[in-house]
Each structure stands twice: as C-alpha cells, then as structure tokens.
Image (cartoon, helix red, strand yellow):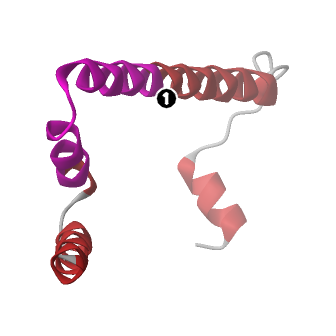
Amino acid sequence: MVLKKRYELFFLKFLFHSMSTLEIITEKAERLPAALQREVADFADYLLSRFEKKDDEDRQWSSISMQNAVRGFEDDPVTYSKDDIKARSGV
C-alpha cells in the first residue's frame, strides 16, 4: 500500500511538471467538492480584480508622468524636424 501511494505521488509530480499551470489548477479544482470549487472561482475573481486595478493604476501613473514631463513645453516656439533630431544624434 505504501509503495502504491509513493508511485501515485511520483506520477502526480511528474504529471504536474509536464502540465501547464492552467491544467494543474483545473485538475486540482476538479477534485474538489462543488462548494470549494466556488471558493476557487471567487478567489480567481479577487485576483483578477486586483490585477486589473493595478494595471489601471499603472496606466494612470504613466499618463500623469508623461503629462508632467511635457508640462511647460506647450508654448515652446522651437520645433524640431526629424532631420534635426537625426543630425543631433549622429544617425
């Protein structure tokens, strides 16, 4: 019996190493009772909302950063062409 259990654990570890993360999550969730599967789904929703909130915050900070970087240049009378930039960079 102990040998069989060790073989099953070895097989599961081997199987998990050759599976994608999504496949591993799915396989484990399928073995849970329905109530716990719902908890897994709720936790996934929580993680998604946290990820989407962070992504939105990053976009907002990026926009604010760019706005601050170019502030004051709106009335700058000097304009540069692509040729000016190429000449300046040595390309």
Q: Which residue lies furthest to the front in this view?
A: 1
Rendered position, 32 above or below 41: below
Q: Which residue lies furthest to the bottom in this view?
A: 3
Residue found at x 69% / y 25%: 61
Rendered position, 28 above or below 38: below
Query: Where is the C terminus found, in terms of image quarters?
Result: bottom right
In the image, taking residue 60 as reference, residue 15 lies left or right, namely left
Image spot of residue 42 (x, y percent): 36, 18
Q: Can residue 77 be seen in this view?
A: no
Query: Where is the N terminus found, in terms of image quarters?
Result: bottom left
Residue found at x 23% / y 66%: 16
Whether the magenta-drawn stretch holds residue 56 is answered as no
Please tell me which residue lies in front, 43 or 50.
43
Whether the magenta-drawn stretch holds residue 38 is answered as yes
Residue extent of the magenta highlight: 23-48
* Residue of label 1: 51
Residue found at x 65% / y 53%: 84
Query: Local crowd at mark 1 within 10 Å, few (<14), some, or many (≥20)?
Result: few
Q: Can residue 85 be seen in this view?
A: yes
Please tell me which residue lies in front, 35 or 23.
35
- Under circle 1, the secondary element is helix
Write down the quadrant of residue 43 in the picture. Answer: top left
Image spot of residue 19 (x, y percent): 18, 64
Image spot of residue 69 (x, y percent): 79, 30
Residue found at x 33% / y 28%: 40
Write down the quadrant of residue 12 in the picture. Answer: bottom left
User: What kind of secondary structure does the magenta stretch mostly adopt?
Assistant: helix
Q: Residue furthest right?
A: 72
Write down the quadrant of residue 57 in the picture. Answer: top right
The amino acid type found where label 1 is placed reads Phe
Rendered position, 15 above or below 23: below
Image spot of residue 86 (x, y percent): 60, 62
